Image (spheres, rainbow, N blue to C red):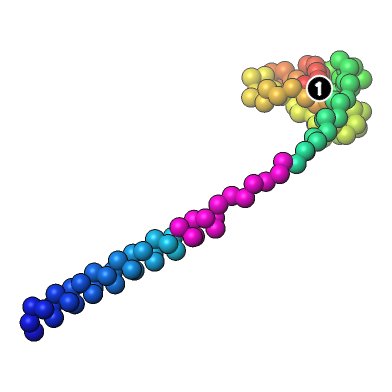
Amino acid sequence: MDEVGTAWRSKRFTSVMTAFRFTTLALAAQALTACAQKPVTPVAVVIPPPPPAPVLGPDACGASRLTAYINAVPRAAIKPAIIATVGERPVRFLGPGQAATMDYNPARLNVDLGQDGRITGFRCG
């Protein structure tokens, strides 16, 4: 081939690549504008206030009704009796030095146990 044919092909190839680049750029710009956020009209959202917390007194867990069980060993018959006395609420038996969560739940009954395993006291929390 001669130099004129090669130069013509080179110019033609360059113009095809330029057109391809321009078309790709135009399509990319169109795709980006299609993804643009449309203005959204604000909507008023009303969040109702939370319901008031129940008012719980110092004996919300029923600990004062359990004095008859002090010094008792919490065996199979005693535990259900304690639970029946205070009603449906969380009850946990805590031995000396036993790990317990520190979250305060006034409705929960904590039964404190001594070194010998006997009940030493009751408290809410």
Q: Is residue 52 visible?
A: yes
Q: Residues within 10 Å of mark 1 (few under 14, many from 20)?
A: some
Which quarter of the figure is the C terminus placed in? top right
Which quarter of the figure is the N terminus placed in? bottom left
Residue 116's spot in the image, x, y percent? 71, 20
Residue 98's spot in the image, x, y percent? 65, 23
Per the rendered image, the range of residues in magenta is: 29-42
Residue located 90% across and 27% down the image:
86
Given the current orientation, which residue lies at the most extreme bottom position? Answer: 1
Looking at the rendering, which quadrant does residue 122 occupy? top right
Queried whether the magenta region covers residue 66, the answer comes back as no
Q: Is residue 124 above or below residue 44?
A: above
Q: Is residue 78 visible?
A: no
Between residues 113 and 24, which one lies in front from this camera angle?
24
Residue located 49% across and 60% down the image:
31
Q: Amino acid at mark 1?
A: Pro
Residue 21 relative to residue 52: left or right: left
Residue 38's spot in the image, x, y percent? 62, 50
Q: Is residue 37 above or below residue 82?
A: below
